[in-house]
Image: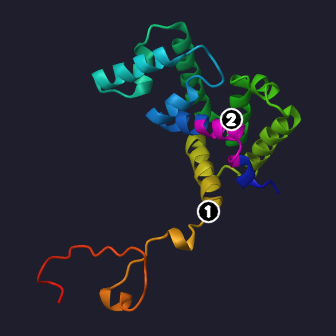
Amino acid sequence: EVNTTSLIDNKLIKTLIKYLRFIINLDDELLLEVINYPTRGIGPVKVNTIISIAAEKRISRFEAAKLVDDKHVKKFVELIEGLKESIKVLKPKEFIKYLIETLRYDKVIEKEKNEKLAQLRVEAFCEAIARYECKTSDYKQETLNLLNEMFLENEKKPDEDSTVKLMTIHQAKGLEYPIVIMQGLEEGILP
């Protein structure tokens, strides 16, 4: 069985997941992370133009990208719109393979220090997605459910030392903590 924890910690896989999440939600912050990866000629000047238009017109950054008159940005918008249509009809495992082909991920993998290992990780990610069977015909929602399940499955439990403990003053009496915050304490309420 594939260990999805080690996969999700890998940059190549994180990028594929960011694309999946962006295609589903068109999140403004994710746009900044996927717009020029793999490199497609959209530099900081064009990205700042998109951000400015979005702020000025009070629209999403993806909608702002549609208004930018640049062939590279237009190609990116067309790519995302095409992927948005594909995700509606392809099962998650089919869509991820289509995404990898569309992004020309083979070129990205070739640039990795350990090309063979990178290829194996991407294949393992495809296998991990193939483990999930579609339960509905809404493949877009199914892909979102898959991503949520993968992240929840790998969520780390917080360290005991880094958690906040809530208790009454009576319970805390006699215990030693480096920091104690007493909410809503006003003069005259606590003897």
Measure the alpha-carbon separation of dots 2 and 1: 28 Å
Q: Nearer the viewer, residue 106 or 138?
A: 106
Residue located beneath label 1 in the image? 156
Residue 92 lies in quadrant = top right
- Residue at x 43% of width, y 79% of height: 177
Indicate the position of residue 58 as horizontal and vertical percent values.
Answer: 29, 27
Indicate the position of residue 117 as horizontal and vertical percent values.
Answer: 85, 39
Name the kind of residue labelled 2 in the image.
Phe
Indicate the position of residue 138 as horizontal and vertical percent values.
Answer: 57, 43
Q: Nearer the viewer, residue 50 or 96?
A: 50
Dot 1 alpha-carbon crowd within 10 angstroms: few under 14, some 14 to 19, many 20 or more? few
Residue located beneath label 2 in the image? 95
Dot 2 alpha-carbon crowd within 10 angstroms: few under 14, some 14 to 19, many 20 or more? many
In the image, residue 168 above or below residue 69: below
Indicate the position of residue 137 as horizontal and vertical percent values.
Answer: 60, 44
Task: Tell me which secondary structure the magenta stretch mostly adopts.
Answer: helix
